[in-house]
Amino acid sequence: MSTLLELLKDGRFHSGQALGQALGVSRSAIWKQLQLLEAELGLVIHKVRGRGYQLASPITLLSAAEIARLSPESAWAVQVFDSIDSTNAQALRSVDQACSAPFLVLAERQTAGRGRRGRKWVSPFAENIYYSLVLRVDGGMRQLEGLSLVVGLAVMRALRECGVPGAGLKWPNDVLVAQKKIAGILLELVGDPADVCHVVLGVGINVNMQSTNDVDQEWTSVRLEAGKLVDRNHLVARLNDVLASYLERHQRRGFSAIQEEWEQNHLWQGRAVSLIAGVNKVDGVVVGIDRQGALRLNVEGEEKVYSGGELSLRLRDDS
């Protein structure tokens, strides 16, 4: 099936006869494989008598070899899956199996992709980036301070370089264009954070997705913003390079060295917001973040600091 996708990925028409000859199978077998592609991967394939078969939109397929070629300085081993429950889940399984970190897990599709607070992450085949980098952390909590914010900053920089100049940050783990979400970050930890542990840096980026009915908030994609199809291998390679640079800086100097840069790119800096934790809500104005990446709010004239994985930040109507 992957060979058939390679032949169809250019978005042009291919006759059943030509496809059959290329794969060494009958036209009937090609027809059955095309039906499987549509049913299992959700791809739309046009069938026109006299012209053949065509993907509704061209696709680029992820390639570990191509990513390595485009990002030669990155020493991260890359695993690419056609379909998987979740790249973060696979990353955690690999840690359990004593896979040596650092390593990167990518997938063309997730069947159970997830974001923060257990929300579903919509993951159509061969359209977006589902990215989980596993790092080994030795020697304590300081290396984890503000880490999700560091990842968000790297994602934002990579997106800007790939034709989305309006990309900016929203505390704690989102990358937005205006008020529309284009990427999200989910960090998961396994082991002893006071000694030796592994952290999974999960990143989801809307790349070539143009429509979906499954997202329950405003969203956009690189393709919608840049107006062109994006090679996801190029974007992954660029993210690898930018992220490696930020991680090295964070490890060497701590989050405080990155704090000001993050604040300068926070789209909600100085805005009136509501901070929500379960049924509780705090109204305030964003002052910034502290040296550990926690949110600083002016609440009725008093500065307060908030952190935690279950917090949600929303703009107030009067902002």
Image (cartoon, grey):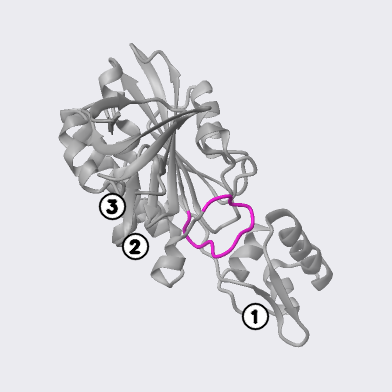
Mark 2 highlights which residue? 164
Would you place residue 252 above or below residue 207 in this image? above
Q: Quadrant of the N terminus?
A: bottom right
Q: Who comes first in sequence, dot 3 or dot 2?
A: 3
Would you place residue 4 above or below residue 153 in this image? below
Secondary structure at numbered mark 3: helix
Q: Who comes first in sequence, dot 1 or dot 2?
A: 1
Q: Residue furthest bottom?
A: 50
Q: Are marks 1 and 2 in contact (CB under 8 Å)?
A: no
Q: Are marks 3 and 1 in contact (CB under 8 Å)?
A: no
Majority secondary structure of magenta residues: loop
Mark 1 highlights which residue? 13
Q: Residue furthest right?
A: 28
Label 1 is placed on what type of residue?
A: Phe
Per the rendering, the mark at residue 182 is none
Q: Residues within 10 Å of mark 1 (few under 14, many from 20)?
A: some
Q: Residues within 10 Å of mark 2 (few under 14, many from 20)?
A: many
Q: Is residue 24 left or right of residue 171?
A: right
Closer to the camera, 206 or 48? 206
CA–CA distance in space, label 3 to label 1: 37 Å
Q: Is residue 60 left or right of residue 244?
A: right
Q: Which residues are magenta?
A: 206-217
Q: Who comes first in sequence, dot 3 or dot 1?
A: 1
Mark 3 highlights which residue? 157
Label 2 is placed on what type of residue?
A: Val
Label 3 is placed on what type of residue?
A: Arg
Which image quarter: residue 304? top left
Question: Residue shown at 17%/29% (left/top)?
Answer: 252
